[in-house]
Amino acid sequence: MANTTVRGAQAIHGQNPQFLVETVIRNRIYESAYWKEHCFALTAESLIDPAIKLRAIGGVYGNQKPTEFLCLLLKLLQIQPEKEILLEYLQADEFKYLRALAAVYIRMTFRAVDVYEILEPLLKDYRKLRYRDQSGYYLTYMDEFVDQLLNEERVCDLILPRISKRAVLEENGELAPRQSRLLAAMEGKDEEKTRGRHRSTSRDGSHSSRSARTSPSARSRSRSGSPSQGGGSDTRLASPRPTRSVSPAGRSISPDRM
C-alpha cells in the first residue's frame, strides 16, 4: 500500500503518474532506506519539511542509488497534490530546493502552455543549487536548471514527457511572444540616453534665448550710464581750497590773518 498511487488520482499523459519515472529507477526508490524511513505516509503539507531539508538535487549516484530529491519527486507523483499547493511551493522564495522540486513536478505533469507560463518566470532566479550525480557534487543555478527543464529531454536521470515547442504555441496563438529581458534593458538605456540629449538641448536653447533677450539698446544704455572719459559738459572741476599755513606752534592760521 505504501507504494501505490493515491486513490482517485488522475492519469497523467494517459498513464499512472508514478509510471513517469522509469521502472528501474522507481524500484530502486522503493528499496531505498530514505523512502522507507522518511517518505512513508507523507501528505502535501508534511512533505514540505523534508523538502526544506534537502541539500542537493539530482537523479541517481554511486551504485544507482536514488537521491533524496528523486524520492520526494516520486512521492509527489504518488499523492498528486492540487495545483494551488504546487504554486505555493514555487512562491516559497527562501526554500530553493522546494521550488526546484515543484518545478520538476510541474514540467512532468502540466500542459505545455502552463509549463511555459509557470516556469519561465523562474529564469530570473539566479541562486546556486548543488547537483549530485555519478561523479559527485557540482554547482548549478536555478535559471540553468529551469532552462534544462524547458529545453532538454532528460533531467535528473528522468526522461521528461514531450511538450510542444514554444514557437509552435506562439504560432497557434496559445502563448504570447516571450519578452527578452536583455532587449528590454537595452531599450531602457537608449531611452535614457535620448532623454539626456533632450535635456541638454533644452538647456542650451534656454541659455541662448536668455542671452538673446539682452537687446542692443539695453547694452548701449548700460554703456552710456558709465562715467564719460572724454571730459564733456558733465565734467566738473573742483575749485581750489585755500591753503593753510601751520605756525611753528602747530596752530593753523587762516589766510585773512596773515
Image: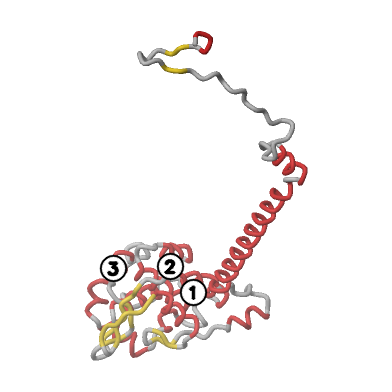
Camera-nearest residue between 1 and 128: 128
Q: Residue 183, position in %: x, y?
A: 57, 73
Where on the picture, by quarter, is residue 75? bottom left
Task: Look at discs 1 and 2 and give the one toward the viewer.
Answer: 2
Q: Return the residue at label 1.
A: 10
Question: Where is the N terminus found, in terms of image quarters?
Answer: bottom left
Do residues under tags 2 and 3 come within 8 Å of each other at their CB atoms? no
**Which mark is drawn over residue 50?**
3
Q: Nearer the viewer, mark 1 or mark 3?
A: 3
Q: Residue at x 28, y 81 (%)?
A: 67
243 with respect to 77 (left or right): right
Quarter of image, res 232: top right
Q: Is residue 245 left or right of residue 176?
A: left
Residue shown at the point (24%, 76%) measured from the top left = 34
Q: Amino acid at mark 1?
A: Gln
**How many marks can you see?**
3
Compared with 202, 182 (above or below) is below
- The residue tagged 2 is 81
Residue 134 at x, y = what percent? 28, 89
Query: Is disc 1 surrounded by few (<14), some (14 to 19) or many (20+) residues within 10 Å?
Result: few
**SS at circle 2:** loop
| Amino acid residing under circle 2 | Pro
Q: Which mark sits nearer the N-terminus, 1 or 2? A: 1
Disc 1 + disc 2, Cβ < 8 Å: no
| For discs 2 and 3, the disc positioned in front in the rendered view | 3
**Which element type, helix, strand or loop, lies under badge 1?**
loop
Q: Earlier in the sequence, mark 1 or mark 3?
A: 1
Residue 47 location (% of width, % of height):
33, 66
Q: Extreme front residue here?
A: 258
